Amino acid sequence: MKRISTSLVQQILLICLSLVSLYPLWFVVQTALKTPQAYAVDPSGLPRAPTLANFLSLFQVMPFGRWTLNSLVVSVVSVAAATLIAVMAAYAITFGRFFGQRVFFNLNIALMALPPVALVVPLFTLMVQARLINTLPSVMLVYTVLLIPFSMFFLVNFFRELPLELIEAATIDGASHARILFRIVMPLSVATTATLVIVNAIWVWNELLFALVFLQNNDQRTLMAGLTLFQGRYSTNEPLVMAGAFLSILPLVVLYLASQSFFVRGMTAGIGK
Amino acid sequence: MVLSVRGPRQPPDSQSTRRRRRGPIRRRLWAYLFVAPAALAIAAGFLYPLAKVVWFSFYSGSLGALSYVGTANYAGLWQDPVFSQSVLNNLKLLTTVPIMTVLALVIALILNAQVRGWRQYRAIVFFPYILPATAIGLVFGYLLERNGVLNTQLRHWQLGWMAKDWLGSAANVVPTIGGVIIWQQLGFGVVVFAAALLAVPQELVEAAKLDGANGWQIQRAILIPYIRRTIEFFIVVEAITVLSSIFTYVFVLTKGGPAEASSVMEYYIFENGFENGAIGVASAAVVVLLLVACVLIGFYLRLRARAADTGR
């Protein structure tokens, strides 16, 4: 009897917790489907007459399509560059030997915890000097750099689990290290790399501070920076803003549903082993 | 996998790498070539800016017309009530860390009892953590307006006395931001703790049960001590986050308002560096933030080193 009541209490607690976790998403969806008039009458109720008009006007009043495309391009380029650079460095850290190896790796771990805001002023002046401000390459470069420490750490942890004999055998057979890395190690690391790519892409997709500061031309914004501009102009049109928020969340929800375990593994990697 | 307890690990200076060291130079060169892009990126993107920001902190004026002012920027911070308010707000927000830790631990322990649907619950609770803070800020901005959904519902349920101006009053705004941070970050703690609890050897728990320990005693005497390292990690990581990665919440929810009441150090840096064009003041604030962050990063490095030594 006591058993049953304990588990009942636990279930009620967990259901409440789930509702609290999911309600804001539900609010986004149902608000985005309402007209502003319907929202004014009943902000929290179900949409009586669901409409997609908000999604259409998003693309009319602001370059929303362009922003989405920008975010996509920036994510792909910086994640690809960071992954390639980190893979090579992680391989050298794990299987090679070079001067300052240990210091380099420890520095890298410290940089994982460095507040990004510490870099924003000097990197801004650097980008101004390089005439890259207000162009997408400015954020691509910065994101690539910012992703490297965590990526390297994550990959080194995985590479250390690979059997060393594998590398040694290939070395003895005369394979070059580039060949070993891309023909032997990478095929064994597909799942790990996928995890890393997903986590990094989400980080880039969600980043606001650098995008806000570096990109001030309307057409050059990323989706997140665009959304904050949007918020300022249309804050009294709640359904429109929520439609924008929904579009910014949608890819993440789809990815999460499709590959939940990758997320969990990657996003919790800074803790523990 | 990343979180699991691991077996003996291959140290970086193992026999085979030592053997390779004695090879001809051409055979050692590859490691330098492989590391070079990353080293360059880190030097240009982290080390140079960090040196530059310290340098800026002794200068005043705008880019191209900087003049040396000694420690005047630091003295200015000391006297600026907005800066002290920002630091104070960061400290207040740090109280979210113990709250999150306890809540996450309780939820993880419930999930660990293998209640029905625990995997689904874990997935749901983790979900907010992946969302962009920008979108979250937009949503909570509407939910927490003076006549927003929360207050309307509270009045509807005859709980009008609980309705507050969550974001618009100086007294409420920081706790409200703290609440939003907890809402998003809690699932991270739950997942981390649940994974650590799964790694507790079942024999330990069984043995305690044979000795007549009840559920509460097992949790207190076995489970929690066993995952202590993970708890410490979580506390340090979250403290770093709350201290230095909450700009988006503040920017989207309040822009530091009302009247700077919810400014935090990051927001102060942003405002001075980019809205007021005071690079020197912003840089001095960065140096102060870095000094505080260094202490936490030091803790983080120590925990990491211990994790590497013990595999846990």
Image: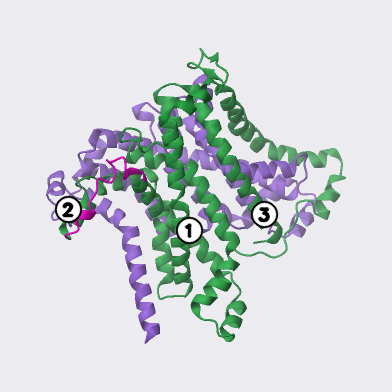
Chain colours: A purple, B green
Mark 3 secondary-structure assignment: helix
Residue A199 tag number: none
Q: Inspect the image, locate mark 3, and give the three-letter code of the amino acid beneath it.
A: Phe
Looking at the image, is mark 3 or mark 2 earlier in the sequence? 2
Range drawn in magenta:
B158-174
- Looking at this view, name the residue that lies furthest to the front: B79
Q: Position of residue A232 (x, y in %)?
A: 28, 34
Marks 3/2: CA distance? 51 Å
Marks 1/3: CA distance? 31 Å
To the question of a shared chain for discs 2 and 1, the answer is no
Q: Which residue position is annotated with label 1?
A: B101
Q: Inspect the image, locate mark 1, and give the three-letter code of the amino acid beneath it.
A: Thr
Q: Position of residue B278 (x, y in %)?
A: 45, 21
Q: Inspect the image, locate mark 2, and give the three-letter code of the amino acid beneath it.
A: Pro
The part of the image, by quadrant, that contains residue B45 is top right
Q: Relative to A235, is A49 above or below?
A: below
Residue A159 tag number: 3
